[in-house]
Structures are given as structure tokens and as C-alpha cells.
């Protein structure tokens, strides 16, 4: 987080629309793939130069150009010119710390969403910016690095099964957003599992370490929430638009995505509440343990300190101490010690300290 | 919770409208029952195959088809085709972790509600998804497993008493929702009783166990709230619709359900506040007990440590110690011990530690 | 609370509009009183049977029928029929755990409010449901038990002073609501006094008992708030209605009640903030006391434990211990003890522990 | 607070519009001053009887009547009749625990604001109710006691400088509200200074007393906030009104007051946050001090308790104890004592307890 | 903060529109610079007297007059007269504790924003008020002191690159606001870095000092938030205006600034959540350390207090004590000591205290 917003500051003072990459550079050179289809035909290829894409812009088929890597201003600018995008949109594509949002560009729509994935060993959440632009007959997607959750969509286009080949770019845009939101559930599941593990740990053996992990999880939840929450408004926004670009039949699908986003948010809120409860449990279990420690100390001290006093008395060296001379003095003292000790133990038993 | 959302992830990447069951499979095969009635006639039967239902769809009588078990895509699909339901609706019916919602399907309405019940020994809340679709002359309900709170409604239809036989499917839909909401009060009562029990325990004998039970109750409350809260908007939504499917006379009934939902929410919020207060009481009672422990330790230590010092003094072996030789040295020391002890006890009495 | 909502569950499964009493039965048989008046004439009587009331319904005078006790379905039903009330309204009248609300019944209005009173020795708040229905020429009120805050209103009607006799049932309805709200201030005053008493106790002698009383007060505040808060929307709702039943001149009076309700809510919120602050004070005073206890323990232990060590050294029985033989060894040790003791006392003085 | 709301209860049961004074009576008899002006002429006098004011009501000049003391129903009623005020407004004027509000009286406006002042030695906030009514050609103000922040406004009218003499009663009303709001900044400054003082005290020497002062300040802030917060809506409300009484040119001034009110609220919220932070600091500084105490106790006990054990061993009187006979036994024990002591001190050094 | 609001009080009682400087005086005399440009020509000069600016007001070129220092009423008044500004606006310009806001002056707009900068060694945030007025052909900016973040904008105008020279004063106003918002990211980065540093310190070595720094950071965050939050509404407000002063093409740029403001707010909220989490961690780490201290004390006391009792027993001087005479009594006692010691150590091992 701090990393991203910090690098954002290098743009400070530049003219608006300046194409400067903000974020970590994750690939060497952008990789561009093109899928072009309609009900009858289908074409998929990896393109070397942006110019190869331009002819497809003129046809009435649906053209989906996907760019992996957004650090190269040249590529972004060429595509922007070809599809008539405002410089500020291009700037946003290259700034990878955007918040999900929807921009109505009159003949097309610009959607920013955040793809959320689990890093390496599934213990950390990483988010990646997805810029999605769709218009009359094209869909552009920009990702920070290769590897995404769109392969099932690609497969559906290739196979020509289902309705995707028969419908327009608005449906493709929906399908992509749906894939992003669907993947949120995978992340949710991971978070849910980790919360459960933590809960067990909390009951069995709460340590300072546990607290750190609760806080780490809380922070990931925060990050996840930041990625998902604004998407709700974005999807609702698309559904509200009245535009020839989006067909009426797509609306029910958008509402479906909307429901899913709400469901994710709902779960995140529940998890947050659960984590808050876990923090309380942790803190009270520390108090309890302190109580336990104090009890042991008190029991031992309260029993032995008076006894030590008693034996101390008869360790004194006074010339004249009648008890010392008694035949059974020593055993009497033992008797006193046992009586005192037992009464104190009983006292603690009655207080339910054992 | 975590269970449900986790299984949701297996749908990730599938085409929208794919009929995959999400949730625990609770029955072997779906059980379908059909009730068909109007003011004059009444028919009730358990059907073997979905096709038996179709003729009833054409008549002007009210047809209520109830399906227990939503894991079989074939059944769902056939019914969906017969009643012209969108594939996404069918998908929602099979995904049993939905949030209560209302979808306007133009000629019919799709309502998701959650039935809340007490499991086994009444110590846990379980929720079950109810999908309810009602149109011009039919009502479809889908439940996850057999056993529901609709028997009184069935009885009212069978007896032909009251207004239910005279009114349309919108009234039946209301009656079913009303039954669901009415059952919330049974759950509320159980929660209220458990809170009272916990409160007594908290005053009499607060233990770490008590804390865990407060948190468990809090979590159930959370779950219950999640099931009820969105229903408010759903019921208000139905009442707002202007459609021939819902007759004006049904509106006052819907407003009544709405009032009940609000009342449930109100009580849940009060319970949440009460649980929060109980947590505070628990934590402060731990502090109090620690205080108690510390006081005992302090009293004992403060009295006996100085006394032990005094007797230690006369345990020294110096050749030349005048007091040792005194005739009443020993008794003098006892005098000093008693004076010191009594003054300390008085000191603590004045501090109101006893 | 739990009591009321629990008994609510016995209605679960009944047909809507079923007249079942929910709540504690507080009287043997309903007591019905009738007041009929206009500018010129005035009549007041206690009626035996509901039927006696019906003739008054036809006259153009204002008829106020008050029923104490809502457990008898027969009475309620008869009145309902006479004044054309929907069965659901009758059901609501008998369910005494309603939340304040306003129902527009087209030719009349149904208002639920909660009368708040202090029980027995003024240490507990009890609420009672008031159902108020007013139409073109009648006002019906239903209370759970006899005894209310309406006597001043009755007196004003009897005396014929003021504007009440000249105005219609809408003004009477206002006057009754105003009496209910006015009584809230009496309860507020009681709560305020109890908070002040608690505050003094908190400063002088905070005990575990004090905490329980803070929580009890908090809960009563919660209950009071639940009774008052929704009334705000109810009163605003009546004022917003455009209907011949409510005359324009009554609006300024309604706005006045509205202001009073807001003022009550305002005070309740302030009291809640004050109670929250008192909880904080209580908890920190426990910490302070623990600190105090620890300090005493530490001072005593820290002074005497080293001294006990010193005297212990010379209690050893070694054959060869030079100091033992010294002429002034014993006094030297006393010197050391005094020096050590005084330095420790100074150390604590410098730390400001005394 | 409790005082005011309590005395409110004595009105319970009275007919609406009954003129009963609520609040502390602060003056012997109301003092009425009258200022009458337009661009050319100016008159200021103290009037004996209300009737002296009436002729001015007929002229087209701006008439400002100020009444100090609102406990005399006769005065209020006469003025009310002369300026056509509704009895409920008169009632509100006499009830001095009103919340700031705006009532549109068709030909005039009734504004309640609260003047906030510092009492005696500037350590307590007191609020006083200002009732302000302004119409076509008059402004009435009612205060609880003499002495206000309006002298600069009077001075501006007397001098005839600035625009006040050229503009109407709406501008005068604005000027008075502006004076009230301006004075809030004086109070804010005082609160800010006291917070700073408390902060320093908190860092240097936090005591139980400090906590009480934080809470006292918090409560004053609460009271101040209650006086200011609703004023925001009041001023916005006046600006929104479309009425001949308020000239378009006054709107920009009202917006200015509005900005100031927001600024005050903003600062109050910041102060509240700061006080909350101070509470946290206080509580954690108590914990820290307890930690400190515990450390000292632990260091001393942990070092000397084992040493006392060692010397205790050689205080035993066994007939056969080889070490006792050794030539250097005593010095050896000293050696052991020093080694143990030094290692323990090192242990604590490594734990950074010194 | 307290400083600013306090000095605000010196205006109390003055006539509205009185030009009194509120805030710290930061420069000797105002410095005025003028930039005048259109697509073709460009002029930049520092002016001595305000009058030099007036001719430029008549031309159709864009005139940007920047004033550093707002304490001189004469300068402000002259400029105000020249550009037809209302006295209240001039008053606001001179009061430097304004909250960001937008005033629609019909033919021009008045925007207050707060420039946020890092003071001296980058450890404190200071805010400075920027008053920005833009109309048909002019932009006025007022700052409290020289030195701002506008140099890149000036450079772009000088160079004539980009679109700035071709567009009107609305675009210049946007460019200035954009520069202000862009600089927020620099501050955010600094805050983020400091939070990270604090987090490391918190894990490695939490001290009372750390707490103070968390609170200091929290307060700066509060201040930053207060500066940024209202700007959101300001920018949205400008974008909503329908006026010839703002061209449609500028709207997309305003939306871009709006997105940036939201992003800043988002980050601030996240930082606040993180700081809250850090406070919790700090408090629980204090508890943990106390626990640690208590454990050491308890282990040592619990082991040695009973042992000291044992050796005390054989330090008694009874004439008749059989064990004393035994040949191996001494070694037996050592055996008992070792057995007791080892069992206690094992007990603590089992409790996982080591």
C-alpha cells in the first residue's frame, strides 16, 4: 500500500494526461493478445506490434485486445489513439493504484476493477489492476502482468458454446467482470480457512504471535475490502446506464454480478466482526492468564510466608525462651504449621482457586 | 459460513447460468409436492416426475409446487423451462448461500429468503435458503431439505377457512413469507432465553467458558441478523412494485410482514447491545477478581514480611547482642510483633480491604 | 423484553389477522369508557357492552372510546367491525410488543405509541402499548391496563376550557400523543437524577455493584430509546399526511410534539454518552486501585526483603565468621539496616509513591 | 442539563400553549429595550410597559424589541398578541431548554439559538436560550438574562455605519445570529487552551484528577456540540426559504454564517477526537506505571529471595554440616551470593529493565 | 489548530465583511505576480502595485494574478473592487482557518482549498489556505506565504506545451487544484513511511515514547483528513455547475481530480485503521510484558519461598529436634530441597512458562 501510493508521488507536478507508469514494473515488455469473433468465425493470435490490431477495429465483429504489462507509454498511446481514448484514461491505465471506478466515455465505458489473488504460499493477498474498456464492437483489457482468471472465458469463446459468441462486447465485458468477482470467492474461502485456523489456535494456545497474525489478517481484509467495496457502485452504475452499447438482455447478468459483489462484501463484513471478536478473546485470555499466574503466586506466598515467620520465631537466640526447652516444642510447632497450612489451603478451596 | 462460501469457489470460471449445486447436499433426491386450488376445488399430491406438474400451469387455479432438495440440475432445469425462468435464476436457486433478495422477472417475482431454525438441542442456529417464485397463477418454492414451517399454511388451504382459498398466488406468497418471519420470533425467544441464562451465569460465576459462550451467541446473532436484515428491503420492494401480479388488497398484509421484520431487527439490535454490555461486565469482573487476588497477597505479605525480618534479627549469632541476654527479651519481641501486626491490620481495615 | 418477544412466538403459524393476545394479561376484563363531545354538549360514561358505543359513531360529535385491557378478542372484534378496521389492525392492537408506527387506513389513522412509566419505587421503567385510531369523528384508544396520563386531557374536555372542545378528533389525537410525550420528561428527569446519584457514588466509592447499576441504567435507557425513537417518524408522518381527517390548524401542534420528541431523544443520547463516560471512569478507577495495592506491596517487600537477607547472613552458623566476634558487629548491622531502609524510603519518595 | 429537563416535567399534563416558565429564573422583572431605525432616523429607549412598543409595529421602520427575562407570562402574552404569535411559540419562548430550531410562521420566522458563554472563572460553559422572531418590519429577541454579545450590533446601528441601517429586519436577524456564532469562537478558543493545558499535564504528571478533568471537558464539549449542531440546519433552513421577508441579498450573509457554524462543528469534532486520544494515553500511562512498579518488585524479590534461601541453609543447626567447619566456608558463601546476585542483575540488564 | 481558532475570536463583534487578518502573519508585504496568456502571447511579471493588474482584466486573454500574503486589507480590497468580489469573500480570503468550500458568485467561482506541506525535517504537516477565484477571463489565487506547488503549472504555461495555453481560466483553475491534490500524495507517502517505521519499532521495542508518536501521527492524520475531506464535495460541486465559465471539456479533468481526492481519502482511512490497530498492539504488548514480569516473579518466589521455609525449620533452636542429631540429616534436607525445586520447575515447564 504505502509502496504504491508513494511511487504515485513521482507524478506530482506533471501535466495531466502525462503517461508515466505508477507501480512496480512486473514484466519486461507488454504482451498483446487478440481475440476476434462473432457467431460464425473466431480468430485468436498473439500480436507483435500494436498496429496489427487496427484492422479489426473496423469490422463489426467483437474484438478483444488484452495487454499484459502497462509500463510502456508507447503501446498504451498507440492503442489509445486507435480507439479514441482520452489521455486521462491512458494515464489511469498506467497508474496501477486506482480504485475501482466507472467512467462513461460516451461511445464506450472505462471500468477499473482489482483482481485479487493469493500470492506464493497462499498466505498473502495481492491485488492487480484491471482496466477494461468496452465499446460498440471492441473490448480492451489491460493487466499489470500475465496470468489471469480469464482462461475459462477464453475457452468458452473458443468452443463457441453458450451464448457468449452470439452476444456483443457488453456481454464479454460482463463475463470478464464476472470472472474477476468469481475469483473473489476463492480468496474469501482462503481467508475463511485462515480465520478458522486462527480461532483454534486462539482457544488452544494464544501467543503474542497469534495477535500479530490476527492483525495481519485484519489488514488483508481491509485491503480486500478496499478492492471490492467500490466495485459494487461500478456494477450498479453500468446497469443504470442507458446506452446503445449495453443491450437490455445484459442487464440481468449485471444484476447477477452485483448480487455476487454484495455477497462478497457481506462475507468480508462478517469476517471483520469475527476478527474483532477474536481480538477481544485474545486480550481477555491474556488477562485470564495473568490472573492464573497471580493466583499461583498468591497461594504459595500466602501459605509459606506465615509459616516461615513461625519457624523464624524459634530460630531466635534469646537466652530465655520457654518453648525451646519443652519436650515436645518442636512437634508442637509442626502441629501449628500443619494447622495453618491446611486452613489456608481450605480458604483457597472455598474461593474456588483450585 | 466459511463452509458455504468456500464451496462457492468451485463454480469459479464456469459460464453464467451453469447449474452447479453450491452447499451441503442434504437429501437423496428432490421431493416434489403439488397443491392446486381455487375457491371451489382443492388438490394435493406428491409428484414423481416434474412433467406431472405441467398441466396445472395452464389452468387459472393457483398452483403451488414445492421442491425439497436443490442439488439436481435436471429437475430445476425442467421446472425452469416450464415456467420460463432465466438460467441465472435457476443458478441462484441451486446456490444456497444467497442473501435475501428480490428479482423482478416482469411476469413473476423471484424472492430469496432464509428460513432460520434451531438445530438439535436448540443451541445452534441453522439457516436454509428458501427460493420463492410467484407469478399470475403459480407459486414455486425451493428448499434445501424437507421439513419447514409451512404446515399451518397448508392446513389453512386444505380447510378452506380464512381468505387464502379466495385470493391469488400473491397472497399465498405473502402467507409463506409471513410463516418464515413468524418463525423468526421462535428463534428470537430462544436467543433471549440464552442471553438471560448467560447473564445469570455472568453475575454468579463468570469463567473463561462464559466468554466463549458470549462470543458464540454474538456470532449466531450476527448470522441471524445477516439472514433477516436484507429481508426488510425485499418485503418493502414487493410492496412498492406496481404490477398486475400483486393485488392492492395484499399490500396491507405485506406492510404487516414488513412491521414484523423491523420488529425482529429491532430485537436483534437490542440483543447485540446487551451482549456488548455483557462483554464489558465480564472483562471488568476479571479485573475485579485480579484486584481481589492482589489484595490477599498484599495483606499477607505486608503483615508477615516485616515480622519475619524482626525475628530474623534475633536469629543472628553475634557474640555481643544485649537484648538476647535480657530476661524478658523474648516476650518483648512478641510484644513488638503483635503491635506491628495489629497496626497493619488496622491500616488495611481503614483502607476497607476487608 | 425477552418475555414479550417470547410470548409472541405462540402466534407462529396462525393465519394473519388471528386475534391472539400477546403480552402479559394485566386486567380481568376490559374496561371501556366513552366520552362524547362537541362545542356545546358533553357526555362521559363507562359502558358495559361494546354495543352501547355504536350509536355515537353515527353522530357528528367527537367520540372517544378508551379500552383498558386488550386480551379479549370479542371486544376488539366488535369494535373493529363497528369502526371498519382491518383484521390486521386488530391483531396489532392485541400484540403488545409493537414498535411505534403509523398506518394510514385511508379514512382513519392507526398510531402505535408506547407510554413509559416508572414502576413501584421509581427504579425501573415499564412501557405499555397505546393503540390510537382516529378518523372523521372518533378516536379509539387501547391500553394494556387502567391508569394513564390522560386525566388532564379528560379534565380539559370536561371543563370545556381551551380549544379542545371546539376542535375535532385530530386535535384530540394530538392532545393524547402530547400527554404521552410530556410524560417522557418525567421519566427523563428520573433517569437524570439516578445518573447524578451514580456519578457521586462513582467518585466516592466505586464498587462492583456500581458497575451493575450503570449497566442496568444503560439497559433502561436502551428500552426508553426504543420506545421514543420511532415515535419521531410517526409524528412527522402524521404531519406530512394530506387528508381531510387532519385540519391544517393541527399541524403546528404536531410540529410542537415533534420538537418535544426530538428533545427527549437528544437528552437520551446525552445520557448514553454520560453513561459510557462513567463506565470508562469505573474501569480506570479499578486500575488505579490495583496500582495502589501494588505500590503498597512493592514498598513493603522492597524494603524488608533485602533487610531480611542481611539479618539472615548473620544467622549462619559458620565456625569462622569474623564479624560475629566484633564488639560492635551487632550495632554495625543495625546501622547498615537503617541506611538501606532509609535510602529505599527516599527512593520511593522521589518516585512520588507516598 | 438534568436540572433543566427535570423542571420541564412540571408542565406535564398542562394544555398546549400554557405559558409556564421552564428553567431557572434569572432576573427579577423582564427588562425591555426598543430600537427603531431606518436609513434616516434612529431611536433607542428602555420601555416600562409592553404597550409602549405597539405604535412602532405599525410604522415601516425596522423595530427591534429585546426582552431580558422570560419568566413573566403577562409580558410574553401581550407581545405575542401584538405581533400575532401562536400560543405554542410563546410557550417555546418560556421553555428555556429548547434545542435550536426554525419555525416558519408564514409572515415571520421563529428561530431558537443558544448563546454559549464562559461562566465566572472561565472554567465552565453555560448556555442561554435566545428566541428570535423576525417579520416584515420587526425583530423580537428574548433572552433569559441581561448581558449579551449584541452590543457591537447595537453600536453599528447607532453609528449608522456599514449597511445595517440600509437593510431590513432580515439583515438584523442575520447580524444577531452572526454575533452569536462569532462568540462560539471565543468559547472554542477557551476549550482549545484547556485541552492544551491538560495535554501537558498528561505528559508530565497524569493523576486520577486528570482523568476527571478530561471527562469534565468531554461533557462540556458535548453540551457545546448540542448547542451548535442543530444551528447548522437552522441557518441552512433560513437560507432555503423563499419568502418576501428575506431579501435575496441577505442570502450570501446567511451562507457565511453557515460556513462559520460548520467550522465550529469541525473544531468541536477535532477536539472530541483529541480528548478520546487523551483518554487512551491516560489509561496506557496507568498500565505503564503499574509495569514500572511490578518491575521494581520483581527485581528486588528475584535477587534477594534466592540469596535469603542460601543464607538460610547455613542457618540450620544440624550437628553434622561439613561446610560449617570449613576455614573459608563463610567467604565461599559470600562468593556464591555475589555470583548469583551479579548474574541476576545482568539478566535484568539484558532484558532492558534498567 | 487551537492557535488558529483562537485568533479567530478577535473578530468577534465586528461587522460582517470587516477585513481583519486571522492567522499567523507570514510575510512582510504581499508579493503579487501576474501571468497573462492566450494561445499566441505570454506575459509574466511581478507587480509593485495592485493597479498595474487592472488593464489585464479588460482583455480577453487569461489573466492569473497570484498574491502571496493575505494580511494587508488594502491590497485585498483593491483587487476585490477590481474583480467585483463581495466583501464577505474578501473577509474569507483573509481568514486563514477556512474549511475547503465552493462559493458560486454567479459570474465567477470562489474555491477554498488547503495546501498541505511537510515542515522542516519532514516530521510535521502544515497546511496553508489557498483561495482561488476564477471567472470568464481571470484566475486569482491568494496564498499565505510564498513558495507553492504551482511551479510546474507556471512552467507549462511558459513553454506553451500541452493544452494549457489553448484553454481558458477554468482549465487553469483545474490545473492548480490538480497540483494541490498531486502534492497530497507526497504527504501521504511521508505518512506511510512513518507508519512503517513506527510499526517496526512497535514490534522490536515498544516504549511509552512509541505511544506518543502513534498519537502524534494520528493527530496529523486528523488534520490532513480535515484538509482533504471537504475538497471532495468542492470538486464534485464544480463539476456539477452548469455555467458558461466552465467548458464541457474541462469536466473530464475535474472528474480526474475528484478520483484523486477520493484515492487520498481512501488511503487516509486505511492509515487511520492501521494506526488504530497499532494502538491495540501497543496496549496488548504492555499487557504481555507485564505478564512476562509476573511470570519471572512467580517462578522465583514459588520455588524459593517453600525452600526457605524448609531451611527455616532446621534453623529453629529447640532443645529436642531428632533430625538435627541424625548423621545424614543435612544431606537429607538437601535431598528434599532438590526434589521440591525440581518438581516446581517441572510444573512450570508443563505450564509452558519457559
Image (cartoon, coloured by chain):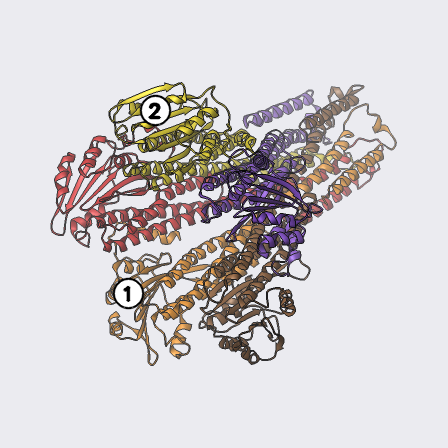
Chain colours: A orange, B brown, C purple, D yellow, E red
| SS at mark 2 in the image | helix
Q: Which residue is mark 2?
A: D55
- Tell me how far mark 2 sits from mark 1, CA to CA: 70 Å
Question: Is circle 2 on the same chain as circle 1?
Answer: no
Number of other residues with Cα within 10 Å of mark 1, as a class: few under 14, some 14 to 19, many 20 or more: few
For this view, does E315 lie left or right of residue D16? Answer: right
Position of residue A252 measured from the top left corner of the image (x, y, whole percent): 42, 68
Q: Residue at x 14, y 52 (%)?
A: E39
What quarter of the picture does the N terminus of chain E occupy? top left
Q: Chain of mark 2?
A: D
Q: Chain of mark 1?
A: A
Position of residue A177 measured from the top left corner of the image (x, y, whole percent): 40, 66
The one of B257 and E112 positioned closer to us in this rendering: B257
For this view, does B333 lie left or right of residue A160? Answer: right
The one of C250 and A198 positioned closer to us in this rendering: C250
Above-or-below relation of E27 to C115: above
| SS at mark 1 in the image | loop
Above-or-below relation of B328 to E296: above
Q: Residue at x 25, y 40 (%)?
A: E147
Residue C222's quadrant in the figure?
A: top right
The one of E339 and B337 positioned closer to us in this rendering: B337
Q: Which residue is mark 1?
A: A107
The one of E150 and B276 positioned closer to us in this rendering: B276
Residue E43's quadrant in the figure?
A: top left
Would you say residue C10 is visible in this rendering?
yes
Position of residue A292 measured from the top left corner of the image (x, y, whole percent): 66, 44
Position of residue E111 measured from the top left corner of the image (x, y, whole percent): 28, 43
Amino acid at each position: 500500500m504505502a509502496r504504491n501510493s508513494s511511487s504515485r508521488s513521482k507524478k506530482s507536478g506533471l501535466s495531466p494526461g502525462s503517461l508515466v507508469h505508477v507501480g512496480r514494473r512486473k514484466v519486461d515488455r507488454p504482451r498483446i493478445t487478440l481475440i476476434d469473433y462473432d457467431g460464425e468465425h473466431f480468430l485468436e493470435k498473439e500480436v507483435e506490434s500494436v498496429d496489427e490490431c487496427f484492422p479489426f477495429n473496423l469490422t463489426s465483429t467483437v474484438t478483444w485486445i488484452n495487454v499484459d504489462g502497462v509500463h510502456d507509454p508507447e503501446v498504451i498511446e498507440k492503442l489509445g489513439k486507435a480507439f479514441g481514448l482520452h489521455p486521462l484514461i491512458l494515464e489511469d491505465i498506467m497508474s496501477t493504484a486506482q480504485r475501482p471506478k466507472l467512467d462513461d466515455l460516451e461511445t464506450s465505458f472505462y471500468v477499473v476493477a482489482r483482481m485479487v489473488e493469493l500470492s506464493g504460499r497462499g498466505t498473502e493477498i495481492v491485488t492487480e489492476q484491471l482496466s477494461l474498456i468496452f465499446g460498440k464492437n471492441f473490448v480492451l483489457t489491460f493487466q499489470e502482468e500475465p496470468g489471469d482468471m480469464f482462461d475459462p472465458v477464453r475457452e468458452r469463446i473458443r468452443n463457441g458454446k453458450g451464448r457468449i459468441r452470439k452476444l456483443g462486447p457488453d456481454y464479454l465485458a460482463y463475463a470478464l467482470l464476472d470472472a474477476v468477482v468469481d475469483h473473489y470467492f476463492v480468496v474469501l474461502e482462503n481467508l475463511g480457512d485462515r480465520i478458522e485456523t486462527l480461532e483454534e489456535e486462539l482457544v488452544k494456545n494464544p501467543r503474542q504471535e497469534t495477535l500479530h497474525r490476527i492483525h495481519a489478517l485484519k489488514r488483508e481484509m481491509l485491503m480486500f475490502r478496499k478492492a471490492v467495496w467500490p466495485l459494487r457502485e461500478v456494477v450498479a452504475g453500468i446497469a443504470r446506464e442507458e446506452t446503445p452499447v449495453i443491450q437490455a438482455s445484459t442487464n440481468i447478468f449485471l444484476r447477477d454480478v452485483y448480487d455476487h459483489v454484495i455477497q462478497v462484501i457481506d462475507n468480508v463484513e462478517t469476517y471483520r466482526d469475527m476478527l474483532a471478536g477474536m481480538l477481544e478473546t485474545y486480550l481477555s485470555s491474556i488477562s485470564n492468564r495473568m490472573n492464573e499466574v497471580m493466583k499461583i503466586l498468591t497461594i504459595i506466598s500466602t501459605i509459606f510466608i506465615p509459616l516461615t515467620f513461625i519457624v523464624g520465631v524459634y530460630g531466635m537466640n534469646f537466652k530465655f525462651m520457654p518453648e525451646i526447652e519443652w519436650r515436645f516444642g518442636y512437634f508442637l510447632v509442626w502441629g501449628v504449621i500443619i494447622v495453618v497450612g491446611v486452613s489456608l489451603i481450605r480458604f483457597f478451596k472455598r474461593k474456588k482457586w483450585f
